[in-house]
Image (tube, rainbow, N blue to C red):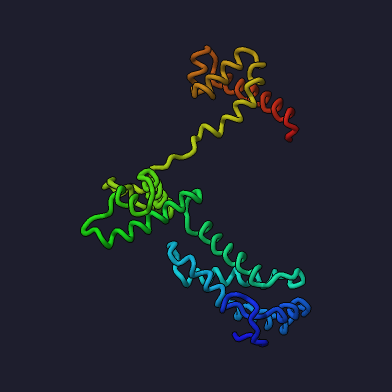
């Protein structure tokens, strides 16, 4: 939208003179008039936001999506700008919009966290590969060729190529390469060991078990640690199965009461 005053006080052709409008916006209360002026300011500065988005065209994201992200950053800049601080809006909006675009790449493009240096290597390797693909026929450029074209070492090229694999991730439903039997990546993942659930409980009763009479302690170990049945324990100790059952119930109740008393649980 053309500037109302027609004055140009900023270095870029897409930077309108809206200083007076921002001062008026700051003085207006919430309501339709303020909202209309806010939207007018956003439209006036959209060309600048689109110019900034254009700087990131070659990084794997569509220009239309980048423009949307830049517009979001512009809206934030309009809402947060304070004209009373004396700085031109452009000096505040440019880093705000640029930061929003960079945040988009950080949060939505790289699947894995990759150091900035490695991201830069990945981009240089990709650009060099694209350039060389126009000169080599029927094959991919070699590591040595990419290194020579990009001014990198071969190790740096390999690092950049590896980083490209971090740019996106395979679904856990993707078939394992070379499996041939339909196995997915998710099928290869392990699960939690059910025995881990008993670790805390065992540690909590260890000392209390040691305080039981020797026979009761032996019965509990045979039942819960050796996984013996009550009949097997009865035969081992020359007792009836009913007597073993009563001893187990009495010992477990004693240990439980002691542990609960120590933890303050009811």
Quarter location, residue 43: bottom right
Image mark count? 0
Position of 199 with respect to 18 (left or right) is: left
| Quadrant the C terminus occupies | top right
Q: Nearer the viewer, residue 195 or 230?
A: 195
Position of 230 with respect to 143 (left or right) is: right
Residue 209: give x, y in percent of width and height: 63, 19
| Quadrant the N terminus occupies | bottom right
Q: Residue at x 51, y 18 (%)?
A: 233
Q: Judge whether 179 appears above or below 97 on screen.
A: above
Residue 194: give x, y in percent of width and height: 50, 35
Q: Judge whether 24 appears above or below 139 on screen.
A: below
Q: Nearer the viewer, residue 237 or 4?
A: 4
Residue 64: give x, y in percent of width and height: 47, 72
Q: Residue at x 48, y 70 (%)?
A: 54
Q: Nearer the viewer, residue 248 or 218?
A: 218
Q: Judge whether 116 appears above or below 75 on screen.
A: above
Quarter location, residue 58: bottom left
Is residue 186 visible from the viewing direction of this image?
no
Residue 112: give x, y in percent of width and height: 48, 50
Q: Residue at x 47, y 55 (%)?
A: 110
Q: Nearer the viewer, residue 166 or 128?
A: 128
Position of 24 with respect to 230 (left or right) is: right
Q: Judge whether 109 appears above or below 34 on screen.
A: above
Q: Residue at x 36, y 52 (%)?
A: 174
Is residue 109 visible from the viewing direction of this image?
yes
């Amino acid at each position: 939208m053309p500037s109302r005053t027609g004055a140009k006080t900023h270095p870029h052709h897409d930077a309108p003179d809206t200083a007076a409008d921002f001062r008026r916006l700051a003085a207006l209360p919430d309501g339709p008039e303020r909202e209309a002026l806010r939207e007018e300011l956003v439209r006036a500065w959209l060309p600048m936001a689109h110019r900034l988005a254009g700087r990131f065209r070659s990084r794997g994201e569509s220009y239309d999506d980048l423009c949307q992200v830049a517009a979001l950053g512009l809206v934030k800049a309009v809402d947060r700008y304070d004209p009373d601080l004396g700085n031109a809006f452009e000096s505040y909006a440019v880093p705000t919009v640029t930061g929003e675009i960079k945040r988009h790449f950080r949060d939505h493009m790289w699947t894995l966290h990759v150091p900035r240096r490695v991201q830069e290597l990945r981009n240089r390797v990709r650009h060099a590969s694209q350039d060389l693909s126009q000169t080599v026929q029927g094959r991919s450029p070699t590591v040595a060729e990419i290194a020579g074209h990009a001014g990198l070492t071969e190790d740096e090229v390999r690092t950049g190529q590896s980083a490209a694999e971090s740019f996106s991730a395979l679904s856990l439903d993707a078939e394992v390469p070379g499996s041939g039997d339909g196995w997915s990546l998710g099928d290869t993942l392990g699960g939690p060991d059910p025995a881990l659930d008993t670790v805390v409980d065992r540690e909590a009763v260890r000392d209390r078990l040691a305080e039981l009479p020797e026979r009761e302690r032996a019965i509990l170990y045979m039942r819960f640690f050796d996984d013996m049945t009550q009949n097997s324990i009865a035969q081992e100790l020359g007792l009836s199965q009913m007597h073993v059952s009563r001893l187990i119930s009495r010992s477990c109740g004693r240990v439980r009461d002691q542990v609960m008393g120590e933890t303050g649980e009811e």
